[in-house]
Image (tube, rainbow, N blue to C red):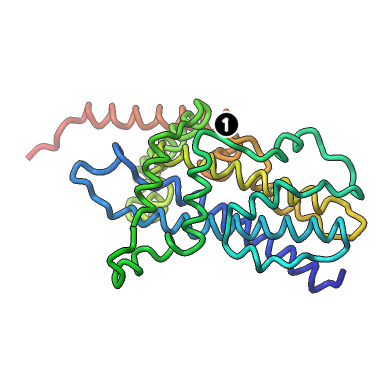
Amino acid sequence: MTLPIWESLVAETQFASDLALAGLRRLCSVPTAPDLFPWGSKDQNYALHVGMHSYSSGLERLCKLAIACNGYAVAGEFPRLRDYSHKIGNLLNAVEELPLPQSGPSVAPRKMGYLVRPLDALDPDVTNMVERFANGAGRYEHLDSLWNDDTEVSTYKEWSALAARASISEDVRRLISIKERAADAIQSELVDNGLLWTSQRVIQDLALDLYKPSVGVVMSLFRKVRWVSASLDVATYYTRQELPLLGEVVSRIFIHTSADFFNYHIARIGDEEAVGEELEAAHERIRLREAEADDEGPLAP
């Protein structure tokens, strides 16, 4: 294998992984009923198209990388991928049919479970939605509707229907709560230290809303990209063809339990115990400040 091809594989894997991750993060912020404002504001719905564009592109690229590297590990040459186009369903089917390369070490037990195609209560509708978007019908629905009266603008409706059926674990609920508490505590501490205006943009990013129904759909989408990432990892793990160890790129992001992925890469909490202790101390300081303010009473005229 030439150095330029080796470098291209690494760069493409990094690109695809970051695209998928950015999409998953953004999709957590898609508001759905009953989270919409009482007057039915839709000014945040665009987050769906931002997230879907990144996620579908990243998933497509990771699928193609897994197929290409598996073909190279098994047969010594890269297969043609252009015929797959943006057909996510066909790409996922092709990944499912990949044989395990015989030249590498055995798969670690922790990863074996991730090599099974994940199916849940949102399938096949969630895959169909991603494919419709990737193929262009969803990506360009707003522009197409300007000149074609028959264009169906339905991505948000499809997402909302999936969100209504989705569920999240108690672990993920707890992590969302910790993130919200952390944002409130950090804002209060910064303001108390005279950084009200300096902290505004930081707080906006930190306090970005996570809507539980949308998070439920995101966790389903995550499990698909985790499976594809595990397949890519196995296809490039110490093969005789000297492929780069692309698992080192995807594993740090995607080869986790659902709760750990949400912790490290969505809520970005890390050590729950340490964060919990810090938040308890911060909330005690906040409580004392509020009590002192109440004791002082209103300023004299």
**Hey, what amino acid is under mark 1?**
Ala
Left or right of 120? Residue 92 is: right
Q: Residue at x 76, y 36 (%)?
A: 112
Residue nearer the viewer, 125 or 175: 125
Residue 64 left/right relative to 188? right
Question: Residue at (39%, 47%) from the top-left corner?
Answer: 158
Furthest residue in direction front, as rendered: 150
Q: Position of residue 84 (x, y in %)?
A: 64, 62
Dot 1: what SS?
helix
Which residue occupies the foreground of this view, 100 or 20?
A: 100
Furthest toward the left, the residue is 301
- Visible in this render: residue 277? no
Q: Is residue 106 above or below residue 21?
A: above
Given residues 94 and 246, the one toward you in this image is 94
Give the quarter of the figure containing the N terminus. Answer: bottom right
**Within the image, what quadrant is residue 165 found in?**
top left
Residue drawn at 79 percent across, 74 percent down = 4
Q: Tell me the residue at 69%/65% (across/down).
A: 81
Residue at label 1?
Answer: 274
Could you tell me residue 82's position as x and y percent?
66, 68
